[in-house]
Image (spheres, grey):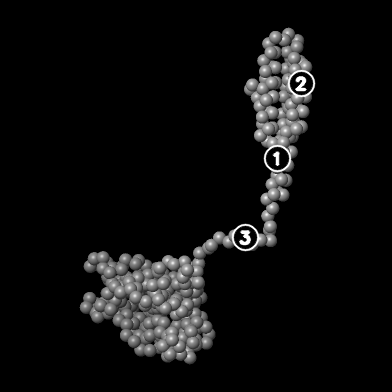
Amino acid sequence: MRDKLEKVRQESFRELEKVETIQSLEEIRIKYLGKKGELTGILRGMGGLSEEERPIIGQLANEIRDNVNEKIEQTAYFLNRKDLEKRLKSEFIDVTMPSKRKPIGNKHPMTKILDEIKEIFIGMGFTIEEGPEIEKVYYNFDALNHNKYHPARDVQDTFYINEDLLLRTQTSPVQVRTMEKQKPPIRILAPGRVYRADEIDATHSPMFHQIEGLVVDKGITMANLKGTLDMFAKQLYGESTKTKFRPHHFPFTEPSAEMDCTCAACKGAGCRVCKNSGWIEILGAGMVHPKVLANCGIDPEIYSGFAFGMGLDRISMLRYGIDDLRLMFENDKRFISQF
């Protein structure tokens, strides 16, 4: 039996020296060390040995098993190393070649302009406030000096859910809610989606975006309004931008005005964008009506304030030269990728 065991060691070593693949190596392991392998078969005959021979043969068998296992592990290491070297040579990578770029998304042009406007007003001490898009009629109209029969309600006709709820026509309700819960001084910017019953065309949509601002404190005057908005226009369109105010009427401000600024496209020289006037209207503004302050629990004898509102869609179209509002909402990657 000793001779058979030594023969297993020698033959297994001889075959392991010639093996070239991991698969062949596994076949050799099964052949000699498996449950039906040659070493196992020899050990089954140990029952016929004397008590003195059994421990000697058992120790030799274990030694040969360990030797063959160790030789198999060494062979496997060298075969894996050889396979890796072969792959490194065949799978050559040219590190100088440009990588494959994954397409990444772009910010929507309105998001970019909104972020820019937020930064401008935050730099002037404003905070950002938001409110519900499904709004109470009281906050959307009544609290803003639009009584039930006010003609402005026809101009701002919207989508009613019931007699008391509607889709807001402006973000002004955010101003009212802020004045109700916060004591002056107040400096807020209220951006968001608004809704009106408009037909869809190149310049109108039943859903669009507004940005409104409100300042309430002691001693606020029209000069503060003009200075704030003039600074805003210069930061948005450039230091050379000029502004002018035209008298207008809004039910929630008195006096009221519309603000124009020099056309960003032609710098005031006159072009197709500004209809050769050199000026573009960008927002409406005015001093907060005393009645609105009183409706919100603020004493108009002590405090005054100004408010303004602008269309984010319009400002974005002017900035980027977009001539059709519908392009903003079509989710066409070809359009978005330009910005």
Residue 319 visible within the image:
yes
Identify the amino acid type marked 1. Asn
Question: Looking at the image, which is closer to me, 76 or 62?
Answer: 76
Nearer-N-terminus badge (3/1): 1
Instruction: Categorize mark 1 by other alpha carbons within 10 Å: few (<14), some (14-19), many (20+).
Output: few
Residue appearing at x 46%, y 86% in the figure: 263
Nearer-N-terminus badge (2/1): 2
Distance from the alpha carbon under mark 3 to that under mark 1: 29 Å
For residue 7, the mark is: 2
Question: Looking at the image, which is closer to me, 120 or 337?
Answer: 337
For residue 99, the mark is: 3
Q: How many marks?
A: 3
Distance from the alpha carbon under mark 2 to that under mark 1: 28 Å
Q: Secondary structure at mark 1?
A: helix
Q: Which residue is mark 1?
A: 80
> In the displayed structure, would residue 135 be above or below residue 48?
below
Residue 159 picture quarter: bottom left
Question: Looking at the image, which is closer to me, 45 or 185?
Answer: 45
Residue 322, image x and y in percent? 44, 77
